[in-house]
Image: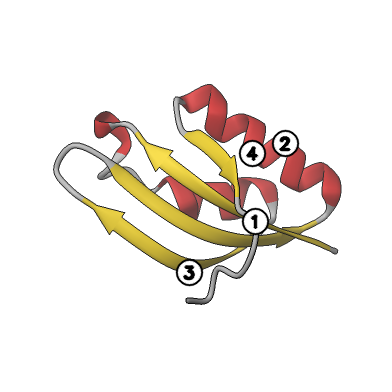
């Protein structure tokens, strides 16, 4: 099992969609939300995501294809 920390930036049309739930179910990933900031126009969520390397790669590519910006997180995300 591998683990990645990423920040997801959602465009307005995806804010109310169950994107993280779908990611977890479709790609067999376990998300752990560390931080979130949601407004009417943008959503930003910092996640730790755990799963196989292949599932992580495919899941993150799927998010990007939907229009979600995926940025790697460096450093401590607990604070």
Q: Quadrant of residue 67?
A: top left
| Colouring scheme applied when the structure was drawn | secondary structure
- Helix, strand or loop at disc 1? loop
Is 17 placed left or right of 62 in the picture?
left
Q: Position of residue 66 (x, y in %)?
A: 47, 26
Q: Earlier in the sequence, mark 3 or mark 2?
A: 3
- Asked whether disc 1 touches disc 3, contact meaning CB atoms under 8 Å apart, the reply is no
User: Which mark, by number, is residue 9?
Assistant: none
- Asked whether disc 4 touches disc 2, contact meaning CB atoms under 8 Å apart, the reply is yes
Count of picture labels: 4
User: Which mark, by number, is residue 60?
Assistant: 4
Is 73 placed left or right of 50 in the picture?
left
Residue drawn at point x = 85 percent, y = 64 percent: 1
Nearer to us in this view, 27 or 5: 5
CA distance for labels 3 and 2: 21 Å
Q: Earlier in the sequence, mark 3 or mark 4?
A: 3
Q: Which residue is mark 3?
A: 34
Nearer to us in this view, 57 or 71: 71
Is 38 placed left or right of 51 in the picture?
left
Q: Which residue is mark 1?
A: 74
Q: Position of residue 75 (x, y in %)?
A: 64, 63
Residue drawn at point x = 53 percent, y = 76 percent: 78
- Helix, strand or loop at disc 2? helix
Is 41 placed left or right of 20 in the picture?
left
Q: Residues within 10 Å of mark 3 (few under 14, many from 20)?
A: some
- Asked whether disc 1 touches disc 2, contact meaning CB atoms under 8 Å apart, the reply is no
CA distance for labels 3 and 4: 17 Å
User: Which mark, by number, is residue 58?
Assistant: 2
Q: Earlier in the sequence, mark 4 or mark 1?
A: 4
CA distance for labels 1 and 2: 21 Å
CA distance for labels 4 and 1: 17 Å
Q: Nearer the viewer, mark 3 or mark 2?
A: 3
């Amino acid at each position: 099992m591998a683990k990645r920390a990423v920040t997801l930036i959602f465009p307005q049309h995806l804010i109310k969609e169950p994107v993280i739930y779908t990611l977890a179910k479709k790609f067999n990933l376990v998300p752990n939300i560390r931080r979130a900031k949601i407004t009417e126009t943008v959503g930003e969520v910092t996640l730790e995501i755990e799963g196989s390397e292949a599932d992580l790669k495919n899941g993150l590519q799927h998010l990007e294809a939907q229009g979600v910006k995926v940025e790697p997180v460096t450093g401590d995300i607990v604070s």
